[in-house]
Image (cartoon, helix red, strand yellow):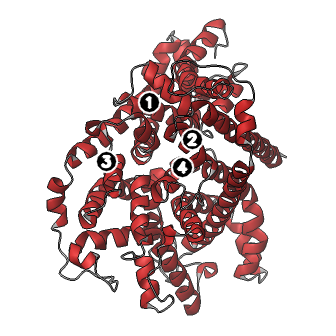
């Protein structure tokens, strides 16, 4: 790791001063693009309303305060409920995905019977169709199952589209578990199920946890189209839809809504710092040859 | 290891729950979409088969414009994602202090709830109070407020930019991983021979990353073609339909106007395009795999 320029830095990684400036300038522009909505959103949340709606535009908040972060709980009724809903929907979706995916990933990783390759390809193809295309029959299906305007209308379809990535990720992880373990268990007379339950699952736990986190993040960040279409009850709305309803209104209390948005994205931002390594590993598993 | 009958049964038992779930939630609706596209399904209780009438109805000039627009929108969005993602990966790969932090800072657009990121863009595009218009005025580039989402042309690009913003982190991180998988000794050999940084990038990095670039562009193409949230939140397809892509168009007809039959026909056209992309993706990745092994 050549992080700092000292004598250990390989010659090839040494830059001239203008190269360093160029790199940092480039990174600054790049990160500014990536972070500007958050910077702007955060500054807006600090500004008093009077400054927000005044011209000319001022970038920095004058008399900025965190007041909006306290008043928003009253101005956006049900805000706490929206956050709770978001977490509830993501959590249940994650549990469903794990229950389905853990056995399936093990099957794909350990057995190769005729037809399984085709099934795996079919799972991957699923991830290429977004829910938005299938809304009409899904709407009718939800109505038939009596799930419209319940949490399930947002959980059940959402989970289906999280399955492919989770299978792919966990399969890659499980393929690294030595086959000898299965053989040893077989020699000892363990049944297939016993081997899966008592030998494979405990070893695969770290991989399962990573998949659970990735699935949760996916479920948390993609709550929109199903919640928009299949649920009209305010008390079941997840955060994005709850806020979306406010953004359309005439008198929008922008600083409080931005504060609310920040509270809503805070869990995701905190997760990034702790899980960056897993995210990268998760994304690139199977895709890039190591 | 047994390859007996019991192992066969066990393997398929493990797969069964996931297969059944996806059959019900994805495969069956896909078939239903095809069936409904030949009906006049709506909010009414009765459903009649109408043959190809829905398809005859939708294939007019407006729909062809929407298809063309979708392809232009997708093309520029994917292109920008690839270019910016590659630039980002190159910079984040440079051995400078702080690069671990920079890598983390790249990820928020990808991780945070998509809709909320889009709300913030909506504010930035606001003509009166938003940052972009405000800063452009401050620096004297424009005279008055520019409401980016109020005009067809600027709204079209504004939605692309937001889509790029959401897509770039994943592309960057993916390219970065592919870049780091390239053997270091190749660079050292080229460096010993006096190859410049640019030559090393042009002759080593780019060719060896071709599979990653191709894979990512195809995945990105499919995801972008499916993009719904961004346009719906920012413009709902407006102003005067200038940002209406095929998905938005289908949503307006099917869910907005409750014309399920006609909406299904539009969805079928999307599915046909997606299937083509999907087939192309599988063919290309398989070819890349066999190239690797050879």
Residue A285 seen anywhere in this rendered image of the structure? no
Q: CA distance from mark 4 to mark 1?
A: 27 Å
**Mark with earlier residue (3, 1):** 1
The residue drawn where x is 66% and y is 25% is A119
Q: Residue furthest top?
A: B5
Quarter assignment of residue B200: bottom right
The residue drawn where x is 33% and y is 82% is A59
Q: Position of residue B253 (x, y in %)?
A: 57, 41
Residue A242 disc label: 3
Q: Position of residue A107 (x, y in %)?
A: 58, 23
Q: Which residue is mark 1?
A: A98
Position of B256 compared to A151: left or right? right
Q: Residues within 10 Å of mark 1 (few under 14, many from 20)?
A: many
Q: Which residue is mark 4?
A: B228
Q: CA distance from mark 4 to mark 2?
A: 14 Å
Mark 3 falls on what kind of element?
Answer: helix
Mark 1 falls on what kind of element?
Answer: helix
Q: Which residue is mark 2?
A: B253
- Do the residues indicated by labels 4 and 1 lie within the same chain of the protein? no
Q: Residues within 10 Å of mark 4 (few under 14, many from 20)?
A: many
- Residue contact between numbered discs 1 and 2, judged by CB atoms under 8 Å: no
């Amino acid at each position: 790791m050549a992080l700092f320029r000292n004598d250990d830095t390989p010659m090839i990684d040494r830059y001239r001063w203008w190269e360093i400036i160029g790199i940092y300038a480039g990174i600054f522009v790049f990160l500014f693009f990536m972070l500007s909505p958050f910077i702007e959103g955060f500054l807006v949340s600090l500004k008093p309303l009077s400054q927000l709606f005044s011209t000319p535009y001022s970038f920095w908040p004058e008399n900025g305060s965190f007041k909006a972060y306290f008043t928003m709980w009253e101005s956006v009724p049900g805000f706490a409920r929206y956050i709770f809903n978001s977490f509830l929907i993501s959590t249940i979706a994650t549990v469903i995905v794990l229950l389905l995916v853990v056995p399936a990933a093990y099957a794909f990783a350990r057995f190769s019977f005729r037809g399984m390759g085709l099934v795996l390809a079919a799972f991957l193809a699923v991830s290429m169709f977004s829910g938005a295309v299938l809304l009409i029959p899904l709407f009718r299906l939800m109505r038939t199952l009596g799930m419209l305007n319940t949490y399930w209308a947002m959980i059940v379809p959402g989970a289906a589209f999280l399955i492919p990535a989770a299978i792919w990720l966990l399969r890659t992880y499980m393929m690294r578990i030595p086959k000898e373990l299965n053989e040893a268990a077989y020699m000892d007379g363990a049944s297939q199920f016993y081997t899966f339950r008592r030998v494979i699952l405990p070893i695969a736990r770290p991989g399962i946890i990573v998949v659970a986190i990735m699935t949760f993040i996916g479920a948390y960040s993609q709550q929109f189209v199903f919640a928009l279409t299949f649920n009209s009850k305010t008390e079941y709305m997840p955060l994005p839809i709850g806020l979306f309803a406010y953004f359309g209104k005439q008198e929008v209390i922008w600083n409080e809504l931005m504060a609310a948005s920040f509270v809503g994205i805070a869990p995701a931002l905190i997760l990034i710092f702790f899980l960056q390594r897993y995210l990268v590993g998760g994304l690139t598993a199977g895709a890039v040859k190591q | 290891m047994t390859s007996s009958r019991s192992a066969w049964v066990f393997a398929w038992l493990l797969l069964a729950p996931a297969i059944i779930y996806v059959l019900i939630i994805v495969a069956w609706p896909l078939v239903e979409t095809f069936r409904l596209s030949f009906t006049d399904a709506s909010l009414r209780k009765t459903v009649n088969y109408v043959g190809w009438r829905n398809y005859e109805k939708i294939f007019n000039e407006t729909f062809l414009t929407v298809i063309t627009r979708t392809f232009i929108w997708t093309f520029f969005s994917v292109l920008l994602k690839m270019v910016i993602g590659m630039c980002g990966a190159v910079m984040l790969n440079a051995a400078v202090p702080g690069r671990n932090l920079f890598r983390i800072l790249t990820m928020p657009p990808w991780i945070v709830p998509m809709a909320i990121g889009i709300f913030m863009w909506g504010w930035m595009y606001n003509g009166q109070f938003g940052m972009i218009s405000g800063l452009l005025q401050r620096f004297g580039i424009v005279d008055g407020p520019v409401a980016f989402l109020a005009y067809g042309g600027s709204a079209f690009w504004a939605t692309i930019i937001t889509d790029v913003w959401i897509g770039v982190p994943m592309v960057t991180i993916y390219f970065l991983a592919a870049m780091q998988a390239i053997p270091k000794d190749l660079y050292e050999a080229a460096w010993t021979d006096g190859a410049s940084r640019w030559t090393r990038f042009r002759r080593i990095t780019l060719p060896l990353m071709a599979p990653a670039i191709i894979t990512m562009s195809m995945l990105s193409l499919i995801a972008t073609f499916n993009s719904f949230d961004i346009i719906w939140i920012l413009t709902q397809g407006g102003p005067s339909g200038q940002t209406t892509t095929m998905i938005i168009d289908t949503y307006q007809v099917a869910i907005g106007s409750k014309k399920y039959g006609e909406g299904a026909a539009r969805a079928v056209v999307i599915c046909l395009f997606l299937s083509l992309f999907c087939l192309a993706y599988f063919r290309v990745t398989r070819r890349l795999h066999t190239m690797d092994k050879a």
